[in-house]
Image (tube, helix red, strand yellow):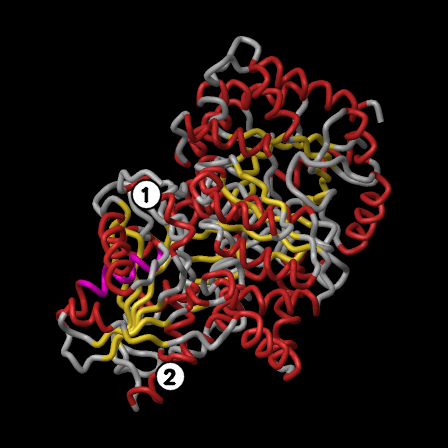
Amino acid sequence: MATAPTQPKDTKPNTFRSGPDDSGHFGIFGGRFVAETLMPLILDLERAYNEAKNDPAFHAELADLNANYAGRPSALYFAERLTEQFGGAKIYFKRDELNHTGSHKINNCLGQILLARRMRKTRIIAETGAGQHGVAVATVCARFGLPCEIFMGKTDVERQKPNVFRMGLLGAKVNPVTSGAGTLKDAMNEALRDWVTNVRDAYYIIGTVAGPHPYPELVRDFQSIIGKEVREQMLEREGRLPDTLVACIGGGSNAIGLFHPFLDDENVKLYGVEAGGHGLDVPNGHAASMNGGSPGVLHGNRTYLLQDDDGQILEGHSISAGLDYPGVGPEHAWLKDTDRVTYVAATDQEALKAFQMCTKREGIIPALEPSHALAYVEKLAPTLSKDNLLVMNMCGRGDKDIFAVADHLGMKM
Amino acid sequence: MSKTTRIDRRFARLKEEGRPGLVTFITAGDPDLETSKKILLGLPKAGADVIELGMPFSDPMADGPAIQASSLRALKAGHKMRATLELVSEFRKHDQDTPIVLMGYYNPIYVYPNEEFLKDATAAGVDGLIVVDVPPEADDELCIPAREHGLNFIRLVTPTTDARRLPTVLTNTSGFLYYVSITGITGAAAPDVNAVHTQVNLIKKATTLPVAVGFGVKTGDQAKALAKGADAVVVGSALVSAIEQSLEAGGWSTSKTVPSVLDLVQSFAGALQTG
């Protein structure tokens, strides 16, 4: 039922892992709010995904690509020096920045390119913010010989030049989007417009757990490999499950990938870290849709959005192009309202500081996105006991960000 | 729906007169509230049979550059949803017969919120709604409540709506159907007239509702050709482009803004008259 009430907070659902329902809802969130032209397409996609999900050959092909092309499983690394410095929880990094293409985005792209092939689609389109998803899409398109067009906001094209160059090398056409503020939401509008126009051949690889059903579900399923591996690796390493998981949230795909396999382990505490930008108290100065937004409908789903009181979407702001999105995946919106996950925020400055600290103390240059997660770990870890096992998802590497960071720190390259 | 609405009456009259109707789209508040009001009040006399009034939205995903720009012009001028409804109230003081359909995206309605919006829209004299991103799968959200307020909920049928899906789209639709003549965004490539006729005939077999055809209609001749077999033709991007072209630097309206839109409406109406 589309208008089902929110789960009351005092009655917990039996499981947090059964969503979405048949109409794509997580509580009141999610759904399929798209134009009629796209409706038959997303119904087709849902059928194709349900078939693929039950086909062992699909899983075998994906597992092979994950292992031999993307380089999974990614390592679970004990960050000894940061653990010492913070003086509390035992900190592990899930090293998804070591994946081929440098972030968790490849997990989803490999799954979706196989779906696109099953559906006999001949052209791939995608949106990108930081360019990590765009690079991953361009990569799988090169691998499978499919033409590819990436929509990227003009502002992001300028602040993420290395990724734009990589996409070009991989054979993708990058279309700079000038509407709006020229960031991720505008890129998504333009990708949707392309899809509406080229319905028969185009497959749209959405990069996060947002969009109309079944995207939030299928992207989550492809990203859940992160949490599944952490579960196994931690059991092997420490003989028990972790106590605390932390991940950054833009649309929320790396976070849901880490959290989902643990949602029903009630002793595992989950923290999602939104982009606090200039601070949550600065109007339109952050990209924290759950901590500083309200429910609304955009890009095919109902979720928390940054918007004004007349329902116009705000641009938001973050130092990180990958978190600079005015919405969030609907499953996160539901996990917030059911209190299963705690959503917090880290500012631009806190993320920059964490970026430098991680680089100097662990020899790992993190992307600005997981730097937000690390900034929160810096606050949280000292409050936890030394036997608390904390896993932070290091979802991307920072090579793409060095120009932007140099700029912010007033350094010359 | 049991009660006849202003939309039903208008299409019945068009049928009596034996001519296709002209449905005109403009965006409320474009380029500013005063100019938009003058255009709106002038539309019936210029030949508009049904008026679609766009509710501006920051992220019009199904619209092409012309309507995107018109939405942004209105928002830049400070337009709010309440002003859209006030425009309709003002129009109703002068015209009791021409139906007004509000067209746009769901979020500004959802935030209003729904029940209050439906109440205020009905009180203002709105006759129907086209909400691009609320498909029949979500009828409980807005379509059925709108019907309970006596508003028609008009749906788009597109080239991707096949015979299997058509009944789903028709189920709770009333007033008229809007056949989108191309896959794509508003104001894009010119539609293939023969393919449109075939589709409109198929739709007509499945419903007694009037069918209006639109998306990509740029000239009077095109309108005339598309009107064959349909009950009305929708013109939108061409009108808001005329607004855009009449503006001076900085986006201010000029003495040419109102007449350039109304003259264009008149020429489309003339082309449809000479059937």
Q: Residue A248, how many percent across, how many down?
A: 33, 61
Q: Is residue A325 visible?
A: no
Find disc 2 in the rendering and name its residue.
Answer: A233
- Residue B95 location (% of width, % of height): 55, 25
**Which SS class for mark 1?**
helix
Instruction: Residue A378 in the image: state x and y as whole percent.
Output: 19, 63
Horizontal side, residue A7 vs residue A82: left or right: right
Q: Position of residue B52 (x, y in %)?
A: 59, 34
Q: Nearer the viewer, residue B156 or A339?
A: A339
For this rendering, which residue is in front, B243 or B114? B243
Q: Quadrant of residue A112?
A: bottom right
Dominant SS of magenta comes to helix
- Answer whether residue A58 is visible to the viewer in this image: yes
* Residue at the spot 25% in from the left edge and 44% down from the top edge: A278
Residue type, label 2: Gln
Residue at figure coordinates x 59%, y 39% from the top left: B63
Residue drawn at 36 percent across, 78 percent down: A263
Q: Is residue A140 above or below residue B2?
A: below
Label 2, label 1: how far apart the Cα atoms are? 36 Å
Q: Which of the labelled discs sits on residue B173, or is there none? A: none
The disc at residue A406 is 1
Magenta stretch? A369-378
- Is B18 inside the magenta-drawn segment? no
Of pointers 2 and 1, the one earlier in the residue sequence: 2
Please state the chain letter of the residue tagged with numbered disc 2 in the rendered image. A
Can you say whether B231 is above or below A277 in the image? above
In the image: residue A404, left or right of residue B260: left
SS class of the residue under badge 2?
A: helix
Specify the quadrant of the image occupied by residue B217.
top right
Count of marks overlaid on the render: 2
The reply to the same-chain question for discs 2 and 1 is yes
